[in-house]
Image (tube, rainbow, N blue to C red):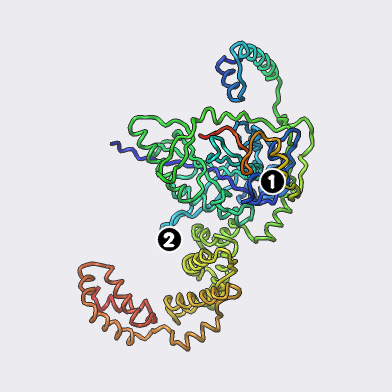
Amino acid sequence: MSLTPEAVHHIARLARIAMNADEEKATRDKLDGIFALIEAMQAVDTTGVEPMSHPQDIAQRLRPDEVTESDRRDAFQNIAPQTAGGLYLVPRVIE
Amino acid sequence: MSQTQWEVVIGLEVHAQLNTASKIFSAASTAFGAEPNRQASAVDLALPGVLPVLNRGAVERAIRFGLAIGGRVAEKSIFARKNYFYPDLPKGYQISQFERPVVEGGTLTLRVGEGEKAYEKRVRLTRAHLEEDAGKSLHEDFHGMSGIDLNRAGTPLLEIVSEPDMRSAAEAVAYAKALHGLVRWIDICDGNMQEGSFRCDANVSVRPKGEEAFGTRREIKNLNSFRFLQQAIDYEVQWQINEIEEGRTIQQATVLFDPDSGETRMMRSKEDAHDYRYFPDPDLLPLVINPDWIEVVKEDLFHQVGPLPREWHAKFESEYGLSRADAIALTPFPRIPHVFVAAAREAVQEGETVRATAKIAANWITNEYLRRWNESAEKHPTVEIPEGVSGELVGYLIRKVRQNEITARTAKDLLDEFWRNAEAIGFTAHGGTEGDIDRLIDQRGLKQVNDSGAIEAIVDEVLAANQKSVDEFRTGKEKAFNALVGQVMKASKGKANPTQVNELLRRKLGA
């Protein structure tokens, strides 16, 4: 399987990564290499093998439903580029 | 223009905010209405180096839901990253579940429509999964900037996905209402729709009747009231039918409903926005729920709220002989089925079983009792209403009516009076007792008049005084007959035996 230039461009856009044509070409070659590896691995019979979602075979630890965080807004907003009325300000986004 | 009969196909995705004290992956508070960003911790802000730690309370609520719908609670489920960019999602991904959700399957049985036309509808659930809510973007008043409040970021959500089993807006609304009632019943969500605790997305498509393949669907996002859900679907269905009948094809899309114009409009085309590139979140290990834990949750749930709605429905069908649709109407919230059971049992006369009184008691509870309850709840939103009038008292009134001791009219007046008594003392006690009923019947002379001579005299008077209604009835207006019945009942102060009044009137009018 080989990726089309359009597919690479699309994925880059979804990830908000700006690439010029040369970079897209180089990335496409790398991705093709990864897909070739995946294709080789498809040959292995995995019938009955549970898909692995995490390399460690242990379960998620849970915490009790208790509020232990205090309000640290001032400290957090000190390092923010811009704030107003307790809100973080960002370039306007509207659909 | 065309004669095609269209069938509507609807599936719903509901986001229910879980009523935990703290967030799903951080120990910040979830309380509504705080000043902006006072409840946004380092985890919620996605500051570098932080890690999510899962809230046990959120998982317990998901298990409760699985039990309530008869679904499968997964022994092992996986958290995944759903990737998209938006400023109110600081990580650049939402932690959700994708391939292995915490709950799969299950059903919800609904009552659709009112009165005699009500029918039962089974809706299958696909899945329910845990995820985190995003923050809020405010687009006004910041000199061309948007303001971001991350208090809501990380609030636990249960996303509940149905199969495309609904065939009308009415069925979709009935489903949403049933689900809304259920999440409050099992106390996992406060159901406050104004505050966004319960939000619906509707997937809507149309197809020619008889066609098996689904049409292309459009998804209406973020409907936060049952009325908007109804209006949005009605508009969308008509829009899709018009498009197809005018020769255009439907493009898959996400749309928003504008309550002011009553229209849906395109928000974004699907291909891009739905390319979320899910993958298992390496920060979170698999969630393991063993059978012992499910047992503990089941026992807690029973201890706290008693039987589940579906358990009541099965009991009311098999032991009480009610239809499923009637049984569903008796389970709007946990106390009502208990009131019904007490009423049906108390209404029973010697030699009868509850099967004899179940239907009449069900009517009294769903019409008379619940109407008064809902009116009081609306008038006093902050008052806890345990019971205005006990189920036993309603049953006693029903028994008196069935024994022809008082008319239904008198019984309803007494129910009103007792309800008002209870309301006057803030529902701290019941508004009356069985002894009060006996005493008032005696003192006020409320006994039903079963003496046909006495009723005939009233009927004659009413007929003589209402020639106009008599003439109208003779020309075939059945409404005029009801007016005459009403006049006789009024003249008898509501005490005349209604069956006898009907018979006498029909005979005298030669009908």
User: What residue is at 69 percent from the left and 49 percent from the top?
Assistant: B29
Give the residue type at disc 2.
Gly
Nearest to the observer: residue B110 or residue B129: B129
In the picture, the disc for residue B115 is 2
Which percent across, then down, holds residue B182? 58, 54
Q: CA distance from mark 1 to mark 2?
A: 43 Å
Circle 2 SS class: helix
Chain containing the residue with disc 2: B
In the picture, the disc for residue B23 is 1
Tell me if residue B206 comes above or below residue B326 in the rendering: above
Which percent across, then down, holds residue B115? 42, 61
Quadrant for the C terminus of chain B, please.
bottom left
Kindly report which numbered mark, 1 or 2, lies closer to the viewer in this rendering: 1
In the picture, the disc for residue B57 is none
Q: Is residue A8 left or right of residue B365?
A: right
Tell me if residue B281 comes above or below residue B416 in the rendering: above
Residue B370 in view of the camera: yes
User: What residue is at 54 percent from the left and 70 percent from the top?
Assistant: B354
Q: Reading the chain from its start, which is encountered first: label 1 or label 2?
A: 1
Give the residue type at disc 1.
Lys
Circle 1 SS class: loop
